[in-house]
Image (spheres, rainbow, N blue to C red):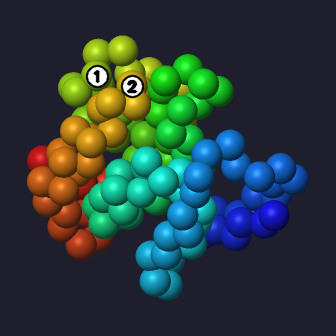
Amino acid sequence: MRWLGRYGVLDHLTPPPHETVWLSNPGRYRARVDYLLVPLVRALWAAGIPTTLSCQDWHGTGRTWLRVPAPFAERLYATVSALDPTARLSGNDLFFGMGVADSVTHALRHTTRKPGAGPPTR
């Protein structure tokens, strides 16, 4: 199976471990996303934050995993860690509790974004 995205091609030889949904952000992204992360990924894209990889229950740990390009990782981590003190950032990878995804989605929907200003601000 093959996914093509703005930041390159990822080849996956095995099916995803969770039920997935194809999402499109016309003219920008098309990705297969774990169904529990669909609202979060849509909110990220609407806030101008591209995702490169994600998992709703990373290796059965009960943690959500998101990979975003470097310019967005620190600012997204600030939002996530305010909601989940156990959140971790490792390079461009964010890990946080699965139950926090809805709160992160809500926080992202209530951010403002100025065209050309980069990542969203509060």
* CA neighbours of label 1 inside 10 A, class few (<14), some (14 to 19), many (20+): some
In the picture, measured across the screen, residue 114 lies left or right of residue 4, that is left
Answer whether labels 1 and 2 touch (C-beta < 8 Å). Answer: yes
Residue most extreme to the right: 13
User: Mark 2: which amino acid?
Assistant: Gly
Q: Which residue is mark 1?
A: 84
Viewer-proximal residue among 68 and 63: 63
Report the number of numbered marks.
Answer: 2
Residue visible at 58% across and 57% down in the picture: 20
Instruction: Tell me the element at label 1.
Output: loop
Residue visible at 54% across and 63% down in the picture: 21
Q: Is residue 80 above or below residue 117?
A: above
**Which quadrant of the structure image shows residue 115?**
bottom left
In the picture, measured across the screen, residue 100 lies left or right of residue 93, that is left
Q: Is residue 23 above or below residue 109?
A: below
Residue 88 lies, in percent from the top left, at: 44, 21
User: Mark 1: which amino acid?
Assistant: Asp
Residue most extreme to the front: 19
Residue 16 lies, in percent from the top left, at: 70, 49
Residue 13 lies, in percent from the top left, at: 87, 53
Q: Is residue 46 above or below residue 37?
A: below
Q: Which residue is mark 2?
A: 97
- Which numbered mark, 1 or 2, is in the foreground of this view? 2
What's the distance in space between the residues labelled 1 and 2, CA to CA? Answer: 7 Å
Residue 39 lies, in percent from the top left, at: 34, 56
Q: Is residue 121 above or below residue 46?
A: above
